[in-house]
Image: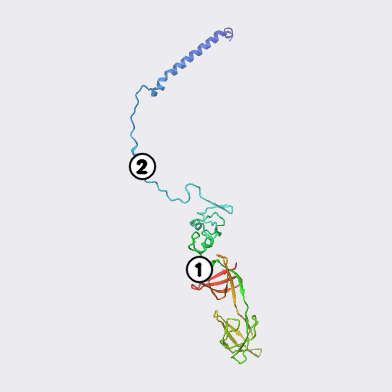
Amino acid sequence: MDWIKEHYDKAALFAAALIAVASAVFIGLNTSAFPAAFEGRDSSKPKDNTIAPPPVESIQAAAAIVQKPREWAAYEGSLLVSRPYVLKDGRLVDPLEGGAQLHPPVPNAWLIQHGLDYADSAILDLDADNDGFSNLEEFQGGTSPVSGEATPPFHTKLRLAKFIAIPFRLMFTASPDDGTTFTVNSKDAKRRTQFLQVGDTIEGSPYKVLSYEKKSETKNEIENDVSELTIQNTETGQKIILVRGREANDPTSFAEFTNQLDGKTFKVKKDEEFTLEQEPGRKYKLIDISESEAVIQDVAGGEQIKIPKN
């Protein structure tokens, strides 16, 4: 170390010479590798311009595919989007599988079959074909909800708006000549006592006297006159038996219906036939009525149909 300090200039010169020798050796080694590295890029060699033969078999196979496009196989659902699910009551429902109905009592398959939006919560109340019947009514009637050509029965749009009872109390009071003349009072019509014979019509009513039968009964050792006067409604054919001294009520009543298709109301008398404007060729008959419902009958087929109240 003392020598280096004393001969610093000589030591620096020696180190520089050593570095120069090492650099020369490194350059010499790398220069010798140049011919091998650039052998493939020697432009002095002639070029090979031979064209390789085309892949005939591959071209023919591609042409066959173009002439006959590949057929898609059947797939339930979409190939491009994820399968649709509907969120109902906090859980995901698969409308295609699983059996869970989105809109009971209508099956999901029925909605999908007719192209209805099963994700719409009000789909059953909508009228897809604008024929006056909701999708639910179309399902219940077994008709298509997207074709107005076939509709459920029109009587399904009837509702009972009002039950109208018209009292007509009658009383057979006596037979002054023992079976030829009969006295009848009409209490609700407030008419005078009528003296009638068989075949006569009771004034202010459609009833006529049909027959008379003399009868009596003993009660508490007292003989009572319970003779019967049979009267008949000339409009409906209904018969009522009037027992002497006992009040009887003529069951005349009406049903007031509302047709939901056009909003019109109309009145029908019990035992009377009627038709609907939408199907004039079909006759119905009102056979029973109460405060809660009416019962009509298809005259041709005999089917009895209950009409609910509004």
Report the front residue among 121 and 105.
Answer: 121
Is residue 16 placed above or below 223 in the rendered structure?
above
Is residue 244 placed above or below 257 in the rendered structure?
below
Which badge, 1 or 2, comes first in the chain's sequence?
A: 2
Q: Quadrant of the C terminus?
A: bottom right
Q: Where, by quadrant of the figure, is residue 136 drawn?
A: bottom right
At label 1, counting other C-alpha atoms closer than 10 Å, the crowd grade (few under 14, some 14-19, many 20 or more) is: few
x, y percent for residue 248: 62, 82
Q: Where, by quadrant of the figure, is residue 174 drawn?
A: bottom right
x, y percent for residue 228: 59, 86
Q: Quadrant of the N terminus?
A: top right
At label 2, counting other C-alpha atoms closer than 10 Å, the crowd grade (few under 14, some 14-19, many 20 or more) is: few
Separation of residues labelled 1 and 2 (CA atoms): 64 Å
Q: Amino acid at mark 1?
A: Glu
Residue that label 1 marks: 279
Residue that label 2 marks: 63
What is the secondary structure assignment of the residue under circle 1? strand
What is the secondary structure assignment of the residue under circle 2? helix
Is residue 18 placed above or below 260 in the rendered structure?
above
Report the front residue among 120 and 14.
Answer: 120
x, y percent for residue 190: 65, 82
- Identify the residue at image location x=52%, y=12%: 16
